[in-house]
Image (spheres, rainbow, N blue to C red):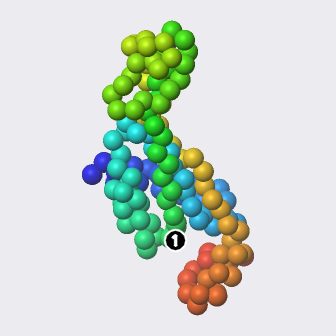
Amino acid sequence: MHEFGIACSILETVREEAEKRPESRLLKVGVRIGEITGVEPDALTFSFDALVEGSELAPLDLVIERTPRRHLCPECQHKFAVVGYEVACPKCAEQRTRCIGGFEMEIAYLELEDREEWVAAQARTGTTGTTGTNR
Ligand SMILES: [Zn+2]
């Protein structure tokens, strides 16, 4: 399952970022997944949730932004989103356009919350857990 490996590497990066910001709590991770990567957003969300559940990162939301396949026309430099298999330039009808987008797979943003707020929120909901702040 391709998506499982991707979810693993997203979480790896998320963990590194979380370690750099011990005072903050991660709420959300936004990723940009190109249309031609073949990644199924549903399968990715499923894998991600399965990995996050029960880990120190839970609860953590994954927000997937799908980016369309984009081509660049070498004749008129026009950039356009490809619909279906129509790769000809819509401006000058050039057939040999070049793919410049739609294969990205990257973390777009991380949404953080202050650690204090997180502890307060936990206290409100009555859940207990280790916060790791023994200073
Ligand atoms: Zn063109």
Q: Is residue 67 left or right of residue 135?
A: left
* Residue positioned 40% across, 39% down in the render: 35
Q: Which residue is mark 1?
A: 59
Front in this rendered view, residue 127 or 100: 100
Q: Is residue 84 left or right of residue 93?
A: left
State how many labels appear.
1
Quarter containing the C terminus: bottom right
Q: Is residue 16 left or right of residue 112?
A: left
On the image, the x and y values in percent for residue 88 come to 40, 18
Residue 7 vs 70, above or below: the answer is below
Tell which residue pokes out farthest to the top in this image. Answer: 75
Tell which residue pokes out farthest to the left in this image. Answer: 1
Front in this rendered view, residue 12 or 34: 34
Disc 1 is placed on an element classified as loop
Q: Amino acid at mark 1?
A: Pro
On the image, the x and y values in percent for residue 131 come to 61, 77
Packing grade of label 1 (10 A; few <14, some 14-19, many >=20) is some
Residue 18 vs 38, above or below: the answer is below
On the image, the x and y values in percent for residue 52 come to 44, 66
**Residue 34 visible here:** yes
* Residue positioned 72% across, 75% down in the render: 116
**Residue 5 visible here:** no
